[in-house]
Amino acid sequence: MSEIIDGSGGAGAPTFDAAVRGAVGELGETLQRFQSLYETLPVESYADEEWVQIERAARELEEMVSRGEDAYAAAELDSQAWYDVMEQLQRVTRKLSEAVALMESVRQRTAPAS
């Protein structure tokens, strides 16, 4: 990951900008899927523990967004902050992906049999 942070590249390593664009793109795609399922599946479809996981993922996303401006401002001055931004993007994307998988499972479980 250090070659991504310092931008020196290396044999085929992406630049930091490319890595951020990729991470943001992946987060955006996952977020769209999450929002679509969140809006279409009624809360009653979820078991209590499932809904807790969905709400936790949504809360983590909100927290990331609220800290985003400060994190990017700090990253202009500190290469460690860039690393932290990337870790945070990856962590939230992973949590959202897990939530999407759970939502897909709930959708399949509650779909009328054909």
Image (cartoon, grey):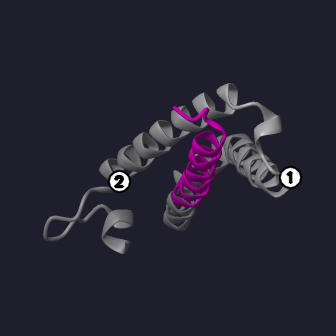
Q: Is residue 84 above or below residue 43?
A: below
In this rendering, position of residue 58 left or right of residue 93: right
Percent position (x, y) of residue 4?
33, 64
Identify the residue at the far left of this view.
11
Is 29 or 42 nearer to us in this picture?
42
Q: In the rendered picture of this protein, how many numbered marks are placed on residues?
A: 2
Disc 1 residue type (three-letter): Asp
Q: Are marks 1 and 2 in contact (CB under 8 Å)?
A: no
Residue at the (13%, 70%) spot, across then down: 11
Whether residue 90 sits left or right of residue 18 in the image: it is right
**Residue 38 drawn above or below residue 79:** above
* Stretch of the chain drawn in magenta: 89-114
Q: Give how far across and how far down residue 26 sits, in percent.
A: 42, 45
Q: Earlier in the sequence, mark 1 or mark 2?
A: 2
Question: Is residue 70 highlighted in magenta?
Answer: no
- Look at the numbered disc 1 and give the secondary structure of its residue: helix
- Provide the residue designation for mark 1: 48
User: Looking at the magenta stretch, what is its main secondary structure?
Assistant: helix
Answer with the quarter of the image where residue 44 lies: top right
Identify the residue shown where x is 59% and y is 38%.
34
- The kind of residue on which mark 2 rests is Ala
Name the quadrant containing residue 25. Answer: top left
Front: mark 1 or 2: 1
Q: Secondary structure at mark 2?
A: helix
Q: Mark 1: few, some, or many residues within 10 Å (few <14, many ≥20)?
A: few
Residue highlighted by disc 2: 19
Q: Residue 84: where, in percent of width, then height? A: 57, 63
